[in-house]
């Protein structure tokens, strides 16, 4: 079968690999239907590493994905302990925690130090035709969610987890720095939760335009540190109750701290390419900020599915999809995403 394997920085190849064998107990074999390209994928694609973890051998990319169940291992039950069936379309949670460590026992599987993660070295991901996944990671999708939308439930899950950490309240003021897919979804969730003044910032005009179409009345295209002065003018020098940094975690971290009010909350979602965090100590200390670090997601798929399905879906994930590529053009899609080509919001691969 075909698979997209990363051999090194910007070296993504379509190769023939062996088809997976029968699933073990509590596993399922799926035909992969759609895979989203994530900002964190860009770190691996561009540098051959992420978070200090280098790719030491060729690996299959892709961690935002869904598929169709082809075969079931004995005892295969989904993420809500329901029986799975052949033919079901399922969204797949990419993280596989151990469920036995202190973090898992306390309800924080996203922090499990023993976990594996589909699409992060050394575990192969989903840009292939078929793969075996843990049944517990599968969440059946209703018909109204498209294949591409099903892949992006992972992106929405990351946004839901970030908003959970932000502890938003009715009529809170919120700033979102970075209107990529996660930032855009955080902004949308804040609006759905009744936050009154929601400010969105990005340096790419097409992202700001989409933020406006999704309901942000205060969406701004900015360069460098313009956002801080602009936000302070808009809020009469107060800042916002909660700020979400959802960019590349460079100078945007300090800017986000400056946008947050005294006693406010700062949620850091972006991943820096050099694995370093810069923030002026005086800014966060004098303001007494609560700083939360968002790592992936936890317990979010059922909520993400409810938000995007039913008679009145509150979020249309397909609106974020800029373009869909066949698996043979995966390298082209990654290069386009990496170059921030105009109009790119979310690219999807469909084997």
Image (spheres, rainbow, N blue to C red):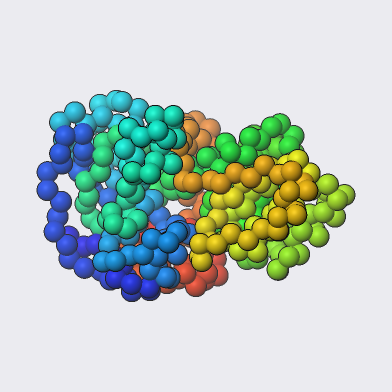
Compared with 229, 65 (above or below) is above
Could one spot residue 111 in this view of the protein?
yes
| Near-viewer residue (251 or 192) | 251
Q: Quadrant of residue 191?
A: top right
Q: Residue at x 43, y 41 (%)?
A: 110
Q: Quadrant of the C terminus?
A: bottom left
| Near-viewer residue (107 or 135) | 107
Q: Is residue 9 left or right of residue 254?
A: left
| Near-viewer residue (279 or 27) | 279
Farthest-out residue, right: 236
Count of numbered circles on the image: 0
Compared with 268, 59 (above or below) is below
The picture places residue 11, in percent across and down from the top left corner, at 33, 74
The picture places residue 293, in percent across and down from the top left corner, at 56, 46
The picture places residue 337, in percent across and down from the top left corner, at 46, 67
Compared with 139, 18 (above or below) is below
Farthest-out residue, top: 82
Q: Residue at x 73, y 37 (%)?
A: 172
| Near-viewer residue (220 or 265) | 265
Q: Quadrant of the N terminus?
A: bottom left
Q: Is residue 22 left or right of residue 283?
A: left
Q: Residue at x 79, y 44 (%)?
A: 262
């Amino acid at each position: 079968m075909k698979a997209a394997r990363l051999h090194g920085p910007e070296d993504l190849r379509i190769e023939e690999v062996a088809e997976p064998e029968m699933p073990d107990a509590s596993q399922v074999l799926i035909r992969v239907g759609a895979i989203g390209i994530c900002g964190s994928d860009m770190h691996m694609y561009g540098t051959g590493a992420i978070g200090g973890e280098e790719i030491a051998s060729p690996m299959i990319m892709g961690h935002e994905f869904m598929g169709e169940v082809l075969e079931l291992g004995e005892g295969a039950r989904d993420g809500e302990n329901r029986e799975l069936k052949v033919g079901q379309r399922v969204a797949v949670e990419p993280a596989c925690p151990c469920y036995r460590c202190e973090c898992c026992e306390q309800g924080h599987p996203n922090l499990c130090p023993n976990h594996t993660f589909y699409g992060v070295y050394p575990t192969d991901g989903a840009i292939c035709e078929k793969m075996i996944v843990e049944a517990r990671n599968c969440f059946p999708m209703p018909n109204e969610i498209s294949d591409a939308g099903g892949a992006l439930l992972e992106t929405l899950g990351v946004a839901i987890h970030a908003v959970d950490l932000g502890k938003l309240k009715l009529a809170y003021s919120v700033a979102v720095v970075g209107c990529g897919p996660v930032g855009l979804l955080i902004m949308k969730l804040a609006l759905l939760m009744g936050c009154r003044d929601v400010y969105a910032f990005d340096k790419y005009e097409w992202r700001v335009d989409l933020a406006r179409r999704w309901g942000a009345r205060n969406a701004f295209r900015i360069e460098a540190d313009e956002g801080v002065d602009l936000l302070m003018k808009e809020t009469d020098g107060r800042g916002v109750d909660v700020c979400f940094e959802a960019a590349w975690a460079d100078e945007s971290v300090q800017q986000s701290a400056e946008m947050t009010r005294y006693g406010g909350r700062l949620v850091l979602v972006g991943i820096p390419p050099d694995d370093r965090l810069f923030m002026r100590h005086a800014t966060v200390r004098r303001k007494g900020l609560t700083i939360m670090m968002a790592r992936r997601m936890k317990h979010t798929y059922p909520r993400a599915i409810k938000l995007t399905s039913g008679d009145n879906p509150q979020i249309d994930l397909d609106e974020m999809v800029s373009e869909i590529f066949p698996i043979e053009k995966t390298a082209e899609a990654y290069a386009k995403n990496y170059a921030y080509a105009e109009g790119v919001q979310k690219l999807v691969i469909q084997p």
